[in-house]
Image (cartoon, rainbow, N blue to C red):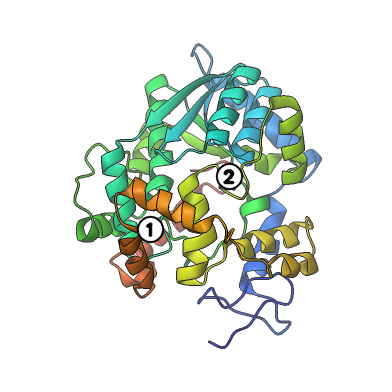
Amino acid sequence: MAYRQCNRCVMDTSDVDITFDENGFCNHCTNYFEKISHRVYQGEFSDNQLKELVAKIKKSGKGKKYDCVIGVSGGIDSSYVSYIAKQNGLRALLVHLDNGWNSDISVRNIKNLADILGFDYQSYVLDWQVFKDLQLAFLKASIPEMETPTDIAIPGALHKVAAKYGVKHIISGGNFATEGILPKTWHYNAKDLTYLKHIQKKFGTRKLKKFPLFGLKQELYYKLIKGIRMIYMLNYVPYNKAEAMSLLEKDLGWKYYGGKHYESKYTGFVQSYIMPVKFNMDYRIATFSTQICTGEITRTQALEELKNKPFDVLKVEQEKEYVCKKLGISVADFDNIMKEPPKIYRDYPNNESKLEFIYNIYRKLYKKPNYKG
């Protein structure tokens, strides 16, 4: 496909599935505007929805130690949604998935969050040897979903903890307002265990028996048997990241960690260096496109920012050495992996069609965009 860029946002043909209409508008921003009416804050209507939801959460937590579980990373979204939960009088248990890649800043942010808001806090620590092996398998597979091991472990861990305490609601910092645009070829469904297990079998060496997997089978069990639901509370409030960051810094001693998802050293390296260099996938394009749609930035501002490299050329070699040492490979091994032809999820066995069919049925039966799993 010849290079082309959307006339409204900045998504381009680095997404192989992108399409354009007669106005030169891409499918991503078009889909965003089609869905925005029922997935972001809608004034008084959303205020009333939030009140009803909070009342429901409190009722389900009656007689229990906690009303809800909140997954926290030390980032903006999870910190702000914890603040919103506190403002609404919820008794939350903060849970952090420790995968061995936490930045020092994110750890301090989480500690301040728990201390100042008065929430209990637990860390769910993964088996490092198993997790490292799974991460390395995804790196060797030459696919952009190198964070799938973390993305699948987070809901797995949160549901385990929620079930342990009899909690029926998990609050996530995920939201449509700031994460509404992300191509599937950049970040395929982490819940596809057919895909994950094939990659681990082909490129990994360890068993995943104790790893907190969260595929369709586990999801149905926790939803239908345990009655646990995932809630995206930021969709019910007016959410602006810059304003949220300012509030967190002022009231909770929160510190910025340097970039989107840089609360994890590995995530920051993957998104700023590996994805644009190996796959020609610049995460900033998706982020800026969403922000253009929300009015946070202009297209001109985004284009100007994209002229800069997504990584710090003075620090990237140091970051590369750190990542390689943690993963137990040499820099030469890493460079050879970077030279391997890039692939996407369709190049490996997956369960996409079956999962899409089942999730489409579920969405029709439970058409509640902000109250789902």
In this rendering, the answer to whether 183 lies above or below 196 is below
| Residue at the disc numbered 1 | 355
Tag 1 secondary structure: helix
Residue 257, image x and y in percent?
61, 42
Which three-letter amino acid code belongs to the residue tagged 1?
A: Leu
| Residue at the disc numbered 2 | 174
The answer to which quarter of the image holds residue 302 is: bottom right
Q: Is residue 49 left or right of residue 370?
A: right
Residue found at x 56% / y 49%: 367
Residue 190 at least partly seen:
no
Residue 161, image x and y in percent?
40, 27
Which three-letter amino acid code belongs to the residue tagged 2?
A: Gly
The answer to which quarter of the image holds residue 113 is: top right
Residue 51 at least partly seen:
yes
In this rendering, the answer to whether 152 lies above or below 145 is above
- Which residue of the protein is positioned furthest toward the bottom in this rendering? 2
Residue 53, image x and y in percent?
63, 31
- Who is closer to the viewer here, 257 or 14? 257
Q: Is residue 207 left or right of residue 9?
A: left
Mark 2 burial class by Cα count in 10 Å: few <14, some 14-19, many 20+: some
- Which residue of the protein is positioned furthest toward the top in this rendering? 63
- Give the alpha-carbon distance from disc 1 to disc 2, as whole Å: 21 Å
Residue found at x 54% / y 75%: 14
Residue 143, image x and y in percent?
38, 65
Tag 2 secondary structure: loop
